[in-house]
Every structure is written in C-alpha cells, then in structure tokens.
Image (tube, grey):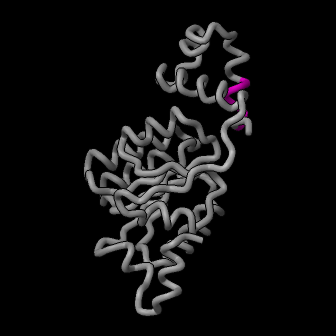
Amino acid sequence: MSDKTDATQADPGFSDADYIGADPSLLLVDDDGPFLRRLARAMEARGFVVDIAESVAEGIAKAKGTPPKYAVIDLRLGDGSGLDVIAAIRQRRDDTRIIMLTGYGNIATAVNAVKLGAVDYLAKPADADDIFAALTQKPGEKAELPENPMSADRVRWEHIQRVYEMCERNVSETARRLNMHRRTLQRILAKRAPK
C-alpha cells in the first residue's frame, strides 16, 4: 500500500481529492473493455472525473477535444500504439500527468513514452492503488527499486525492443540491423517479455 493511502487513513480530514488537485479530469485508454470499466469505477471512487477510450483513434479524438489533467494509456491497442495518444495530448496540454500502462513492458518503449511526456510506466497487471500512486506522485518522489535484476534473456529481449523502437517499429529494418531472420524476430516480438 502506498504512503499516500496510509496518509489518508491516518488523517480522516485528508482525502484522495487533496492529492488530485483542482482539475480531476482523467482519460483512460485501453482496449481491454472489462479492465477499462473496472479501472474507471475505481478512479471515480478516488475522486477523478473519468473519460474512457478503447482505441487510439478514440483516445486522440478525446485528447484533442478536451485534453485531460491526468491520463492512463495502454501501449498496445487494437488500432495502433498508445504513444500516438500521448503525442496528441502533448500537442494540446503540457501539464498532463501521463502513465503508460502495458502488458508488454520494455525499456525502449518506456524511454519513448517518457520522451513523449509520460511521467511513469507501469506493467500490467497494475492495480488501482498503484495507478493512483503513480498519477499523484509529487516531483522528486522516487519509486521503489525492483528486488530482482533482469535475467540475460530479458536483457536480450530489451535490446531487441530498443532496436525495434529505433527503427520506428519496422520489422524488416529491425531484423536487418540485428542480423536476424524476419520471421524469428516476429515470433520474439509477439511474445511477452521473459522474466
């Protein structure tokens, strides 16, 4: 449980809304409908005014219409990359606190998300408490370090993902740069990250 949650329990006069601030608008973008609706209910219970989108196109449209103060965006959506939604938000509003959420966590996309303006990167399954803590984290606060370092397989996978992102997600160019067969690369990219 986060320090923020402990603080709200310790002081009954202090609520989640005190962490959120004057603008509670939150955009959630994820193509997993049941997860999206559960998360929306949990964030509304914490004081956010939630808007949801289930695709890149819908997320971009909502970001351009009314850019939110907070956003939680899935990296891989059915119609493209959540990084495009981050870019759309940043074109309209530069103070949005954006969290990139994904089941395909890797260093390269985390770096890209941060370069585009995300403030944190959480791997699924992340619960509402983790997401709330990341959204309301103050500048200078540090996340806890992981207990276990990456395995050699994970380091290799991260390198492949970094090159893939450098090649703007072009499989053929990535395979050429890694001196790897294209089909082998496609199989690696389709799998989840190793532990």
| Quadrant in which residue 88 is drawn | top left
**Residue 17 picture location, percent across and down:** 39, 79
Q: Give the main secondary structure, helix, strand or loop, of the magenta stretch.
A: helix
- Left or right position of 15 against 153: left
- Left or right: 114 in relation to 3: left
Q: Dividing the image into 4 quarters, which one contains the C terminus?
A: top right
Residue extending farthest to the bottom is 12
Q: Is 114 rendered above or below residue 95?
A: above
Residue 193 % position (x, y)? 69, 36
Residue plotted at (62% across, 64% down)? 127
Q: Where is residue 160 in the image (x, y as percent from the top left)?
A: 61, 23
Q: Which residue shows up at 59% across the image and 47% down it?
A: 102
Identify the magenta region. Answer: 187-192
Please give the name of the residue rendered at 68% of the width and 22% of the height, measured from the top-left corner. 186
The residue that appears at 57% across and 51% down in the rendered structure is 145
Please identify the quadrant where the N terminus is shown: bottom right
